[in-house]
Amino acid sequence: MSVFAVFARLVEHLADLLTPLFHASAAAAAIVLFTALVRLLVHPLSRAAARGQRARAELQPRIAELRTKHAKDPQRLQKAVLELHAEEKVSPLSGCLPSLLQLPAFFLLYHLFSSSTIGGESNGLLGHALFAAPLGGRWADALGDGGPFGPAGLVYLGLFALVAAVAAFNFRRTKRMMASNPVAVGGAGEQVPGLGAVNKLMPFMSFFTLVTVAVVPLAAALYVVTSTTWSAVERAALYR
């Protein structure tokens, strides 16, 4: 039995358990619950990433000394900063690990709700919906079936509103963190390759979720929305 068939059965069983509470939207609730379980599993890594960020902040005075020492030799500066991170056992990219580990779960949901058959059998998950919006449908389908204010379109408008609110919260919080402590959020001053460009885009990254929600199947969009909201709350607690 393929991993997709096993996961499809897991979602179906969770939906059956949640039906008394959520009725026709039980499968959608099962996806939200699955997302929460995934986030709980990677939470220890998120805590470790928060500790790593604080450790990078503590290195700021030493990095400032290196910038002064190697001001005329950018390549030597970059090497010295990387050596400092290695010496102190601090990874400048540790914050990326929790997000990377969630990708398999996202692609699993994407595949399940994009396939008409699973394990050689008809994909029964495609018959489930969140209110009037099919979990296997996309925003384009909702626009073609009732428009943006139709039954399915309203479901997407609700998701877009939630994502926009979370993105705005993340934007303000990230800007404050970068202004108060640029090294703590991976500032370009660390001279880590590639982080300068990422640093400029970081405050806007949450808004890219709006595009993802618009183009992926609704089931995968639910995963993204739930995970993004979880991240906002988690980071606000861990990075106080």
Image (cartoon, rainbow, N blue to C red):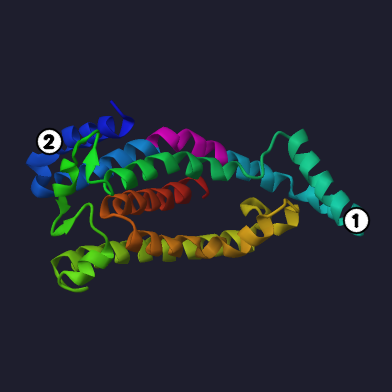
Q: Where does residue 208 sit, x and y in percent of width and height?
A: 45, 63
> Mark 2: which amino acid?
Asp
Residue 73's label in the rendered image is 1
Image position of 92 with respect to 194: above or below: above
Secondary element type, mark 1: loop
Give the magenta-colored segment's residue range.
40-49
Looking at the image, can residue 192 be seen? yes
Residue at image x 52%, y 48%? Answer: 239
Residue at image x 20%, y 71%? Answer: 144
Taking depth in this image into account, of 177 and 160 the one nearest to the observer is 160
Judge left or right: residue 24 versus residue 193. left
Looking at the image, can residue 65 be seen? no
Q: Where does residue 201 sit, x and y in percent of width and height?
A: 57, 63
Q: Quadrant of the N terminus?
A: top left
Secondary element type, mark 2: helix
Q: Where does residue 130 sit, x and y in percent of width and height?
A: 17, 54
Look at the magenta stretch and give its main secondary structure.
helix
* Number of other residues with Cα within 10 Å of mark 2, as a class: few under 14, some 14 to 19, many 20 or more: some
Residue at image x 51%, y 36%? Answer: 45
Q: Quick check: is 45 in the magenta stretch?
A: yes
Residue at image x 56%, y 63%? Answer: 176
Mark 2 in CB contact with mark 1 (< 8 angstroms):
no
Q: Earlier in the sequence, mark 2 or mark 1?
A: 2
Image position of 112 with respect to 228: above or below: above
* Number of other residues with Cα within 10 Å of mark 1, as a class: few under 14, some 14 to 19, many 20 or more: few
Q: Quick check: is 55 in the magenta stretch?
A: no
> Mark 1: which amino acid?
Asp
Which residue position is annotated with label 2?
16
Label 2 to label 1, Cα distance in Å? 63 Å
Q: Where does residue 174 sit, x and y in percent of width and height?
A: 54, 60
Judge left or right: residue 12 versus residue 103. left
Q: Return the residue found at the far front.
A: 120
